[in-house]
Image (cartoon, grey):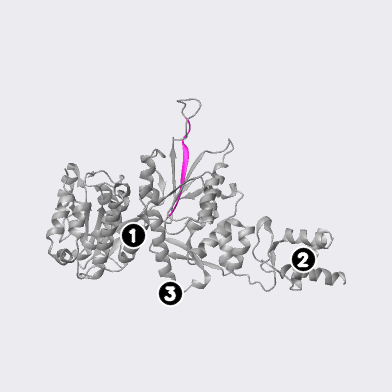
Amino acid sequence: MNQELSWENTIKELFSQGDIFLAATELVDFLSEKLNISRVYARQLIKRAVDKKLIKNSHPFKFKNNQYVYMAPNKHLNLDTLIQLSKEYKPSMYRALALLKKEGNILSFYEARKAAATPVENIERYKLTKLDEEIKELISNDFLYSVKDEERDITYLAIKELQDSPEITRLMRLHYEKMRLDSMFIPDILRWLREHNFIDSESPLYRRIDNPSIGAKHNDFLWDVCTYTNTTGFAINVGKKEKQTLVVLDVLVHREYLKVDLDGFYNRIQSVRNSTQSGVRKILPFIFYVDIDEGVKKEIGRLNLLHFSLQSIFGRKVTELIQRLDSLQKSLNKPIQHDDNNTNDIVENVEKSLKLMDETGHLDNLQNLKGDMFESLMYVVISNLFPHNSRIEHSKILKPYEYDVIVQRDDEIIIFELKGFKNTTIVNLGDNQTKNTVKWFFGKTLPHAKLKYTMPLTAFGYDKSKIRACYITSANFSTEATSWLEKTNESKLKPKKLDCYYDRKKLLSLIKSDENLESMRATTGFVSLLEKYYLKELT
């Protein structure tokens, strides 16, 4: 057999063995050893093999050490093939692309950056994959495209086949709800960590339910949560003041926690640990999940990472609660008509969710979640208060703020602020720089909404005098706040049918007496539900 035929047969035989992928250096090593030739000559043979179409390379995509990967000529270089290649030769890209496929061919940039474990600042400082450049290449070669949810200001990655598809709007909305579900438990997880002395900071940075595509940026990387703790174990020098330890969290609720999630989290941790010249940075990582692969769970243990299931913190019925929350969100996404079944569905879902939380004894541990359900109930109440000739929206985004409920009528537009606090909570007057106060709403977010709704030549174009406001809480206002609100109630901000404010007592009176809620009172138990879980008489 002549030498020409020998090397051709060797390459054909090698790549006939199923899914064979070899980087350039691997193929050079194989040929030089198999054929007893120099590495220089092996490279020449590879070039000739490509020219003769005995094999093909991964052009235009290069992998580790800036190498092409070689494969059989009948292999199609599509997204699935790239995922196969990147699993071995570019793990960071593999994690991002594998998650995109897992999530139904759509993924937010936030999740892609977390999975790839790439920095978002000081990129040149790290010898890591530059995700944005990789994505640009995938987009320019028609594997992916980026699509923006203009209303929520979120950019997603999606497979090219979805471009111009009517499905993309639905997929963006569904994925947004998945991200909200992942964010929903974070405030209550933080409360649990604080109660058990795992963390000290009262101002953690975290991924918020009203903006779940942002997360916390710290030390050049993205996290679901980052904060600090002094709880680092006993030191030899008792009483010695040590530096606080960075705490980072990975929280996943809407699906199973996978190996790609763990690898992305662990690689971000390692990058930050080794980012200082003075030594290794101390980090305390936590992973929170609902479902997890057993192999991944063992790997977490091997890496000595703290991990908790939500069931272990909030009770075994949390899985059923999550299903209820998902069903509730789907109901909230449908328009509510006066006297319709959707009103009943939402009230029923909230009631069953609160009952589940109560039965497990974790109602107080899930205060933020309980507050979210108060907002859901009040959205239904408000929709029934304004049954005709009204456009009613919940979770309305007017960048940079999200508004709980906005009611648009011919003669007025009402901006609602809803706060489902404990009935022992006192809402202070505060100022326009302090969140969860009266003036934060009336002096900060309301003026912004007023500006948006009174801009000339827009779809809204309201007169300023038609913009009204209403602050509703299950708690109580301070004496100072009540006095200020009473004066505001005499101004043009007062809605025509409502007052500017409702505390626990006033809200209870409203829901028991308003004639537009008569049908809702007859067909649902929303009054007793609010009384039991939110509007109890103080004892």
In the figure, 144 relative to 447: above or below?
below
Residue linked to disc 1: 325
Q: Is residue 503 visible?
A: no
- Residues at discs 2 and 3 in contact (Cβ within 8 Å): no
Q: Which circle, 2 or 3, is nearer the viewer?
A: 2
| Above or below for 322 versus 433 | below
**Disc 2 secondary structure class:** helix
Residue 481: image quadrant is top left
> Nearest the camera: 458 or 182?
182
Q: Is residue 321 magenta?
A: no
Nearest the camera: 393 or 200? Answer: 200
Measured along the vertical axis of the image, is residue 43 above or below residue 503? below
Query: Which badge, 2 or 3, comes first in the chain's sequence?
Result: 2
Q: Amino acid at mark 2?
A: Ile
For the point 56% across and 68% down, the residue is 143
Q: Is residue 346 visible?
A: yes
Q: Nearer the viewer, mark 2 or mark 1?
A: 1
Looking at the rendered structure, the secondary structure element under dot 3 is: loop
Which one is earlier in the sequence, the residue at label 1 or at label 3? 3
Q: Could you say where residue 228 lies in the image, as x and y percent from the top left? A: 44, 39
Q: Which residue is mark 2?
A: 46
Magenta extent? 242-252
Q: Residues within 10 Å of mark 3 (few under 14, many from 20)?
A: few
Q: How many marks?
A: 3
Above or below, comparing residue 140 to residue 205 in the picture: below
Quadrant into which the C terminus falls = top left
Query: Residue at (48%, 57%) from the top-left corner?
Result: 111
Instruction: State if disc 3 and disc 1 touch (CB < 8 Å).
Output: no
| Residue 497 x %, y % | 15, 61
Dominant SS of magenta comes to: strand
CA–CA distance in space, label 1 to label 3: 26 Å
Q: Nearer the viewer, mark 1 or mark 3?
A: 1
